[in-house]
Amino acid sequence: MRDSLTTGAVVGLGLPGVRLASAQDSTDEQTRNKAAVRRFMESQGTAEYEQVLAELRSPNYRRLRGGFENLAANAAGSELAEAAQPVRTAFPDRTDTIDLMIADGDRVGIRFRIQGTHEGNFFGIPATGRSIDIQEVGIL
């Protein structure tokens, strides 16, 4: 309702210097945001990851929750945490595949699949050589 009133006032009063956002502007922004998230996801585990992160991450970026945080919390303060290897070392062949991506304004939601082989200590869980296939979601 508020947006309708604002639009009516701008159109009716002919306010100078006010530009209305079109549906196309919104679609273009969402397309750009989805491309940025895809680029971020595809750079993980590569040599260009830090460069891509520096380009895409905003100055006020805050990570609210990371993947496998429950395992990290359970291992915190113990020898399990000290023995743990980074996720990409514990699962050296890890791949993340985006199954679904939706955008709304400056937020992009993704559902993705993590697959890999457990070849290193993972928060106290010794290597098993078994495959993992995990569904995860993220909002960026």
Image (tube, grey):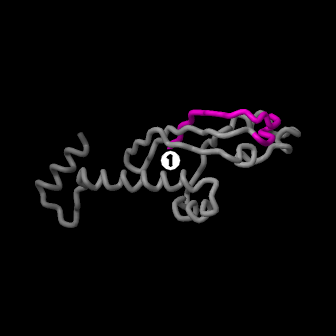
The N terminus: image quadrant: top left
Q: Residue at x 57, y 33 (%)?
A: 135
Residue 67 is left or right of residue 8, and the answer is right
Tell me the residue that label 1 is attached to.
140
Which one is nearer the viewer's eye here, 126 or 103? Answer: 126
Q: Is residue 106 magenta?
A: no
Residue 12 is left or right of residue 126, and the answer is left
Q: Residue at x 68, y 34 (%)?
A: 131
Compared to residue 109, the image places residue 24 above or below, namely below
Residue 21 is left or right of residue 131, and the answer is left
Compared to residue 134, the image places residue 34 above or below, namely below
Q: Secondary structure at mark 1?
A: loop
Residue 43 position, x and y percent, is 57, 56
The amino acid beneath tag 1 is: Leu
Q: Residue furthest left?
A: 12
Residue 103 is left or right of residue 133, and the answer is left
Q: Residue at x 13, y 55 (%)?
A: 11
Which one is nearer the viewer's eye here, 20 or 77? Answer: 77
Which one is nearer the viewer's eye here, 3 or 46? Answer: 46
Residue 6 position, x and y percent, is 21, 49
Q: Which residues are magenta?
A: 119-140
Image quadrant assignment for residue 103: top left
Residue 86 position, x and y percent, is 74, 48
Q: Residue at x 25, y 43 (%)?
A: 2
How crowded pointer 1 is (Cα within 10 Å; few <14, some 14-19, many 20+) is rated as some
Residue 39 position, x and y percent, is 50, 56
The total of numbered circles placed on residues is: 1
